[in-house]
Amino acid sequence: MYRTRTTRTHLLLWLAATAMIAMPGLCRAAESASPLTKEQIADGWIMLFDGETTYGWATKGDCKCKAADGALVCEGGDGWLVTTTEFADCLLKLQVRGDAKGVIVWGLAKDGDPSKAANKKEIAGKAGEWQDAEIKAEGARGFIAIQCVPKLEVRNVCLKPLAEKSIFNGKNLDGWKPLIGPTWPSSFTVTRDGCLNIKKGPGDIQTEAQWKDFCLQLEIMSKNPDAEKKKLNSGVFFRAEPGKFWQGYEAQIRNEFKGDDRTKPVDFGTGAVYNRQPARKVVPNENEWYTMTITAAGNHIATWVNGYQTTDYTDTNPPGSPRENRCRTEAGIISLQGHDPTTDMYFRNIRIGAFPEAK
């Protein structure tokens, strides 16, 4: 086994593995875009495995892995199955099944070296039996890593970000600054039920605070009386420059797809990194609340909509402004977009967790 040591830059994991018990409603095998319940989605849970593909996962070493029968299956080789996305404080739940040798789950150092990971924990093997595991990580950042062993299967892998702080109080616009100008007619108000409403457009409302590496979660609704004719357009900008209009990377909001095929988004689709990577599936509908999750760590960006991962993007462009197809890793503001005169967007439960500095 690898020798481990503890350092602040690694993801600290505590593992509690039990005999097989039911996990009602939590991370069932993926029969739809998001099998999580509405309550779990609103609570911030996301799926790290969609039940059908290896999207969002990579292998280290000689590990060979595929998706089959609703599980990630390690077919052989000596190595690691790791997430392509970094996380900080989080709660992880998953189920594993393997042989009597057991399986090790731990956080992986940013440079991808398992020997530098902290707090490894082993799940004792019970051949042929699914076992539940719950892992809590606090105070650091890193990737989720699972050691490949023969016949290992992993399913129902779900994660909830922790230590997030609200950046919208539901009462007023404290902490936010609308851009005011004759060519920016959007109106920004707080509704009686505590939502941030953006009408008309174009427009832009920005946070006063800035974030570099983070996990952002918020609930969104496009209120659209003509949903059959046209889908509303908006976006969530991040790592944007203060006071500049529609700057930074944009997580697209547009619940439109071609024909009946949600895997063919129009104008990149909700959850896309706009102008960079289209959403691989348009999950939400007009006039319904949904939750968007955005992580940014270094030059890597990932998004989830209703717990379903929609993008997995690494920006390899030279440094500069994202609006000019450049890579920006510096801290920036969060902003919400009013797009055009038909804009009628609602946002609530906006919260963000800053990642520790990578070292």
Image (spheres, rainbow, N blue to C red):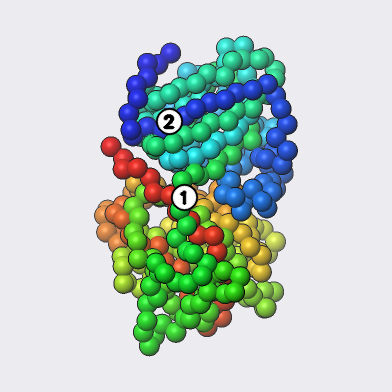
**Label 2 secondary element:** loop
Q: Image point 38% across, 45% down: which residue? A: 355
Report the amino acid beneath label 2: Leu
Q: CA distance from mark 1 to mark 2?
A: 17 Å
Q: Image point 61% across, 59% down: which residue? A: 290
Q: Position of residue 138 (x, y in %)?
A: 44, 36
Q: Image point 57% across, 45% down: which residue? A: 46
Which disc, if any, is residue 12? Answer: 2
Which disc, if any, is residue 336? Answer: none
Mark 1–mark 2 CB contact (< 8 Å) = no
Farthest top residue in view: 100
**Label 1 secondary element:** loop
How packed mark 2 is, by other alpha carbons closer than 10 Å (few <14, some 14-19, many 20 or more), is many
How packed mark 1 is, by other alpha carbons closer than 10 Å (few <14, some 14-19, many 20 or more), is some
For the C terminus, give its image quadrant: top left
Q: Nearer the viewer, residue 108 or 134?
A: 134
As displayed, is residue 42 above or below residue 346?
above
Q: Quadrant of residue 255?
A: bottom right
For the N terminus, give its image quadrant: top left
As displayed, is residue 260 above or below residue 126?
below
Q: Which residue is mark 1?
A: 164
Report the amino acid beneath label 1: Glu
Q: Nearer the viewer, residue 256 or 204?
A: 204
